[in-house]
Amino acid sequence: MSIFSANFEMKCRYVDGIDITSLSMEIMRAVQSRIKAQNILAYMKSIIPETIVNKVLAVVVGLFSLMFLLIGLRWLVDPSGAAGQLGMPLLDDVGRSTQIGDFAAFFLTLGALILFALVTSQRIWYYPAAILLGIAAVGRVLAWAVHDAALALDLIVPEVIIAAVLLLAARWLGKTG
């Protein structure tokens, strides 16, 4: 066994004293109970009028869109504040240009995709936004597992939750075609 694989196994096993193997088993149990969760959602839809569920979901998704658009605009107007909000310094020279351009593009695109989905009621617009957030979450986990970055659960969890809400919105609010 190489040093890399031993370190990787140790990192993958424990995070801040938490046994990740046990945590992953809990996640697997939760995935296995997905059918129960779907039944709960179906029950909720049966007792709450669909129009109310759709309106609440549309408001929540609209707030996500607004949040991402504002974060993207902040990268253009106040990049040092936006960088600090994400726990990073504002870089210099070409790094600054890349940082501002890429982060503004990421957040503005994310907000615009969600807004397009709401305005057009086309479910296809929700998927790229959910994919962007999912890839960001996976990238953070890989950065931790492979590149000695901090495990940013405070950023990963909201990304996963928002991606899940967007997929739910695609199913409930979006139309095909």
Image (spheres, helix red, strand yellow):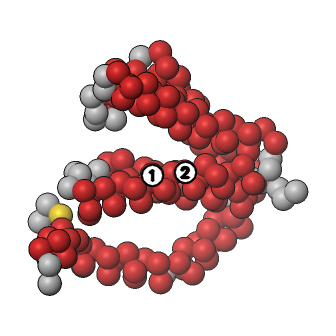
Q: Which residue is mark 1?
A: 136
Q: Is residue 101 above or below residue 155?
A: above
Q: Residue at x 40, y 21 (%)?
A: 79
**Which is nearer the eye, 54 or 92?**
92
Q: Quadrant of the C terminus?
A: bottom right
Q: Position of residue 44 (x, y in %)?
A: 63, 65
Q: Say which element carries label 2.
A: helix
Left or right: 101 with respect to 28? right
Q: Are marks 1 and 2 in contact (CB under 8 Å)?
A: yes
Amino acid under label 2?
Answer: Leu
**Which is nearer the eye, 140 or 156?**
140
**Which is nearer the eye, 171 or 68?**
68
Q: Say which element carries label 1.
A: helix
Q: Residue at x 43, y 24 (%)?
A: 97
Q: Is residue 72 above or below residue 175?
A: above
Q: Position of residue 82 (x, y in %)?
A: 38, 26
Amino acid under label 1?
Answer: Ala
Q: Which residue is mark 2?
A: 132
Left or right: 172 with respect to 150? right
Q: Position of residue 145 (x, y in %)?
A: 26, 63
Q: Quadrant of the N terminus?
A: bottom left
Label 1 environment density (alpha carbons within 10 Å; few <14, some 14–19, many ≥20):
some
Label 2 environment density (alpha carbons within 10 Å; few <14, some 14–19, many ≥20):
some
Q: Which mark is residue 124?
A: none
**Which is nearer the eye, 60 or 103?**
103
Q: In which quarter of the view is residue 49 placed? A: bottom right
